[in-house]
Image (spheres, rainbow, N blue to C red):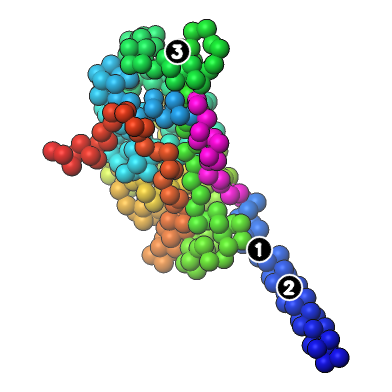
Amino acid sequence: MFFRHVNRYAAIAAAILSCAIGADAAADPLRDKARSLFGSARAATQQEIDDPKARLGQALFFDSRLSSTGQMACATCHYAEAWGADSRRASVTARGTTTRQSQTVFHAQDANGLHWLADLASGADHAREAITGGMGFEKREQIVARMKELGYEKPFRAAWPGAGEAVTVDRYAEALEVYQRTLRTRSPFDAWLDGDDRAMTKKQVRGLRKFIDTGCVNCHVGPLVGGTMKQRFGLVERYPTDTGRPELDIGLMQNTGSERDRDVYRVPPLRNIARTPPYFHDGSVADLRKATEIMARVQLGRQLDDVTIGELVAFMESLTGPIPRNFHPPKGIPFVSPAAARAAR
């Protein structure tokens, strides 16, 4: 009888504790708000990574022979040491130095448009454009001949069995997009959104609250914490005064010719932002604290104190995930990253 009562009381206590925990979890307004504003990201599955098109795209992404000079690859401007971005102020391609800083390819395929102007709809569009752009060929068909010379016929046929002409520009572009769609990372922020209170520090959680309350979410929203819209850089103040770079870029206006599009760019996603300096389209600021202070002032008209800036940066650090396990050259594919090339000098 005694043990029956003990068990009954234990069951009642467990039920009360369960209700208390459930009520506490349900009453977490910050997490609920964050879920509604952002939503968590997922890593690629092994099945997605093993897709023959993704495997082919991985080789194409890192193969420096697939350029007019034989020394450039997609990965030349997007390498592991920079978390899929370029640590230089401006990237250097087969056609020379570009005018903008290259953002990370991690999660890029999930954004609403690629590049700083969001002027390309997909990774396949970007790959086609890059053949006669950064890769330096005069005609797109030239890369087809190069791939055949290098023995790519077999992996193309594995990716498209039964195809008549396996190696084509469009299939080259599709393979690169399929591969880049696997370049996703899970971060501590995602684990916290899923209910793991230990995934983020108290400072990072305070930073999340400040990120929302300060107004950063007016533009940096969605699963990528940005990448969903275009916005003028310098809504309240002119940005060149703060970044120290002369105004050399007119933004979306270069495409539209409209004055209303001057200094308009795609709002950059902030996932992995703590590992992808320098910042802004011109690569003018190397420090994330400085970039955060500038953004608050020129976009929101806010002068933030050091504590708030530190908390915001801490939150952004919680958006860092591990480098995707398939972000490396496949065996036999020649590639030397800019960081490795500098170290060898």
Picture quarter containing residue 4? bottom right
User: Looking at the image, which residue is at 52% across and 59% down?
Assistant: 208
Q: Characterize the local packing of mark 2: few (<14), some (14-19) or many (20 or more) Cα atoms within 10 angstroms.
A: few
Q: Which residue is mark 3?
A: 167
Q: Which residue is mark 1?
A: 29
> Is 336 situated above or below 70?
below
Mark nearer the N terminus (2 vs 1): 2
Task: Tell which tag, 2 or 3, sits nearer the viewer.
Answer: 3
User: Looking at the image, which residue is at 44% across and 20% down?
Assistant: 155
What amino acid is labelled 1 in the image?
Pro
Image coords of residue 80 (percent x, y): 34, 41
Q: Quadrant of the N terminus?
A: bottom right
Which stretch is magenta?
A: 37-53
> Is 268 situated above or below 251?
below
User: Looking at the image, which residue is at 72% across and 68% down?
Assistant: 22
As for residue 52 lying within the magenta part, the answer is yes
What amino acid is labelled 2 in the image?
Ser
Image coords of residue 297 (percent x, y): 42, 52
Q: Which residue is mark 2?
A: 18
Judged from the image, the secondary structure of the residue bearing numbered disc 3 is: loop
- The answer for how far apart the CA atoms under marks 2 and 1 are is 19 Å
Q: Quadrant of the C terminus?
A: top left
- The answer for how far apart the CA atoms under marks 3 and 1 are is 53 Å
- The answer for how far apart the CA atoms under marks 2 and 3 are is 59 Å
Q: Characterize the local packing of mark 1: few (<14), some (14-19) or many (20 or more) Cα atoms within 10 angstroms.
A: few
As for residue 144 lying within the magenta part, the answer is no
